[in-house]
Amino acid sequence: MAKGTTAPVFIVGAPRSGTTLLATLLASHSQISCGPETHFFPYLEANYQHLAAVLRDGDWPSKATEFVGAIAVEDRPVADLFGVSPQAIHGYLAAHKPSPQALLESLTEPHRLALGKHRWAEKTPNHILHLATLRRLYPTARVVRIVRDPRDVALSMATRLPWTSDVPLHSAYLIERWYRQSKGFFERDRLAYTLRYETLIAEPTETLHQLCCFLQVPFEPAMLHTEAAARHTAPAHEPWKNQVAQGLDSSRCLVWQRRQPDDSLQAISTVCREMIADFGYRPLAGDFAPILAHHTSERFVRDRHQEIDQLLAHNHLLVPCDPLQLSSGEQVVYCDVPISGHNYGKSLRKFWQFCLTLVALWLKGVAIAFSAFGPSPEAEKNRLGQLAAHLLKRLGSPAELLAMIGQSSSQQ
């Protein structure tokens, strides 16, 4: 069969949802390479103020080589994980025009060529938060999202990942935010594809056939044998990924159903109720007094985890919502102002969206409250973020979460 498109493939999803397994299955294909996570787009965002100098360097690609070489995950240079030397990065960049794409491809292309593959894939779960940038830079790329029952994801994050909370409910807020933030992209983008982890495990051949059709490559039975490719996608310093070398494991599906239902599982189900409904997972209702919230960032959950735990102990739950769906007389608590960083254009778009939402709520008669911002989180926001926080404080009123215990709450 003739080789099809060479458009890259980006694999995204929540941590512990099967992204590494999917990357390894694709890397087992004779035409597709996939290395470790690059974390390229969040790195690009964090260093946006330096990008112009890198791309306009008169001594190209000296600064660009340093820029790529500085990308690290857990203090390990990504280039080392790819097995790409600084000399190889420099040589690749020197042969290409300055662009953000060239920076990323100085890692993925040498790796692809070393393996003799036709096309490269890249897997970094949190690239799901940078889909607009990804699509702008790669208009023909295929973007593949894998989803898994959020209760299994939250339980696995709490027990397997060293960089997350050991309380599954805290991870549920991350899962919910990532899903809600990326949902529109996968509903509208014609080159985006979603598959369920549970379906992949139960019907691997049929599921991979369908995925390969979307990617315009032939299905290969060798894709089901992951041991060889796992050495590229699951680095030794990340032991929580070592199961992918063992292939598909049905015992990892719907693990939460083998636990006795408790308040924690019910709370996770409530927080992630939209995702559970959208993908037909079994609902598990909890009789909680909801505190409707918006922008429950990871920072907020980490910094205020004791209050969140106390709320749950008193049968109250911080429930993320779309504030524009609320009615007059209801209240929403803003937990953060999601505007920061050095990308002015992106921040400006977020700022106007944030302001329009606040004004719409105010005109609608929805009560706007905000949880107290500490000096450090507010100081880290850029000027637009600080201005948005000022507007929030002008239109809203301060709210203490624990003070809401025992108060009547509006049900959604």
Image (cartoon, rainbow, N blue to C red):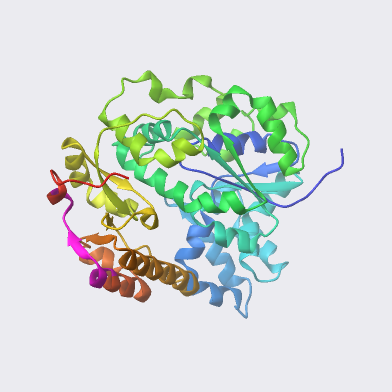
Q: Is residue 399 magenta?
A: yes
Q: Is residue 89 visible?
A: yes
Q: Nearest the camera: 329 or 409?
A: 329
Vertical side of 94 occupied by 191: above or below: above
Q: Position of residue 146 (x, y in %)?
A: 55, 39
Q: Quadrant of residue 55?
A: bottom right
- Could you tell me which residue is drawn at 40 percent across and 30 percent down? 283
Quarter of the image where the C terminus is located: top left
As drawn, 50 above or below 208: below
Residue 355 quadrant: bottom left
Q: In this view, does 258 lie to the left or right of 36?
A: left
Q: What stretch is highlighted in magenta?
A: 392-402
Tell me: residue 411, above or below residue 296: above
Please say whether residue 235 is one of the residues in the magenta stretch. no
| Quadrant in which the N terminus appears | top right
Q: Which of 280 and 306 is in front in this view?
A: 280
**Residue drawn at 37 percent across, 62 percent down:** 338
